[in-house]
Image: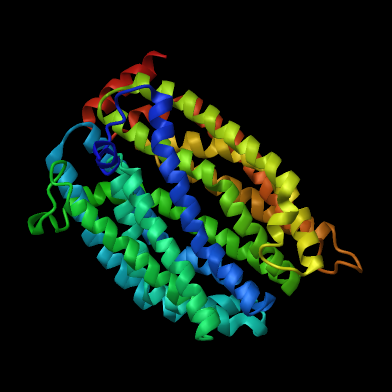
Amino acid sequence: MARLQSLFAAHDLTEGTPWKRIVQFAVPLLLGNIAQQFYNTADSIVVGRYIGDNALAAVGSAGPVLHLLLVLFVGIAVGAGIMVSQYFGAKDRQQLSQTIGTCIVLTAFASLTIMVVGPMVSRPLLELLNTPPSIIDWCTDYLNIFFLGSAGFSYYNILAGVLRGLGDSFSALLYLLVATILNVVLDIVFVAVFGMGVPGVALATVIAQAVAAVFCLLRLLKMRDVFDLNWSMLKINRELTRQIIKLGLPSGLTQAVFSMAMIVVQSLTNSFGEMVIAANVIIMRVDSFAMMPNFSFGNAMTTFTGQNMGAKRLDRVEEGTKHGVGIAMGVSAVITVLLLLFGHYLMHVFTDTPELVDFSVRMLRILAIGYIAVAVTQSLAGVMRGAGDTMTPMWISLITTVCLRVPIAYGLAHLSRSELHPTGRPESVFISLLISWTLGAAITYAFFKKGAWKTKSVTSSTKREAAAEVSST
């Protein structure tokens, strides 16, 4: 019982062997990220099996627009997580409590904004993307339901981010697993039983996310030994809001640019026809699972770094970085081998169409080796963000996404035009992604070695000491 209770608690990552603490924290994150991917994957499997390939394409085409309009929450969540981890590491109860209260209020305003703006711009954006007429109505319905129910999504992500900043990655995992099971059940009920089609899978996801958000809030209300969460704390603190925005805006802009780039590339993908669109959906679903260890270790390094920066343990941050990057690369190498060997079987989960399966396998093999490069990028970027340097990862993402991936994708498509492929070869989309991943890892490593991230801590004492250390090296 004591062991079980210890899982549902805040954890101090400033003590113990770094690699053990990182792994202990990252494993629940990984399982949680996998569970979260089941939201979208379950949607794709249900619509692909019960409705058809066009419905599968509709869900995929809606994805980039959905991501673009939800970046507000990404910014708040990142800024909140960094500040929570640093104030928790510094044992500053007052600032920690005010930060959490401010985040809850900010999320309410952001949710209302999405609920109003989202349905107004969803169809115009889909038309701008040249979404095929055969699927545009499904795409619009899917997006509108998501936007109207965005409060559940936003609060789960923000509150789960707060829990992770406190070192509690297990609670968020458990609540997400419950919500994932609920999502799968509702998917089948709404689509297979009630015949609601594509809108049914969106409604199922919205309900499940709201359930996860409620569980996270209830958990935080029980953590009064760590911080205070009462009505007096539920207000906007100007200085904390400024700091959250300062830390979170670069990550939000990164996601916005990434989503815009996805939209631009999606327009190129759409020009190849419904089969390529459907294949892209399948590949991105598999890709999402393959990326999970990278994102999990990146988030783990953010919390680990944040707490240790707050505790003024820069030596421990550097030691933990070596451990974290090494483990992340090893896990990604294993995943790459598994994808190369068993990718064909994964595609059959989504569709039985032979041409679609064969094409998807070929495209996935192009991407496979790039996951090791992303392991380096995510881990080192996580360290920089945890230290308070969110600008550097933003600029790197801008360079690799806007300046590299998009031009390369369109350039390769143009150069590969032929009678058989009048709009170019669809491989260009995936080759461009592989190139951007590889160069992104090299650029991230170079900036990490410069060490400017050591001077970005929210806590002033840590910042001064880090600045002195950087200037002496």
Whether residue 258 is situated above or below residue 329 in the rendered picture: below
Q: Nearer the viewer, residue 124 or 276?
A: 276
x, y percent for residue 129: 61, 73
The C terminus lies in quadrant: top left
Residue 119 appears at what percent x and percent y? 43, 79
Q: Nearer the viewer, residue 318 or 153?
A: 153
For the residue pair 160 and 171, the one nearer the viewer reads as 171
Q: Residue at x 47, y 55 (%)?
A: 35
What residue appears at the point 22 percent right and 26 percent down from the top-left corner?
A: 461
The relative height of residue 38 versus residue 65 in the rendered view (above or below) is above
Name the image colouring: rainbow
- The answer to whether residue 80 is visible is no
Q: Between residues 349 and 259, which one lies in front from this camera angle?
A: 349
Q: Is residue 180 left or right of residue 261?
A: left
Residue 28 visible to an observer of this rendering:
yes
Query: Which of the 4 image quarters holds residue 53?
Result: bottom right
Q: Residue furthest front?
A: 1
**In the image as oriented, which residue stretches furthest toward the top?**
472
Q: Position of residue 378 (x, y in %)?
A: 51, 40
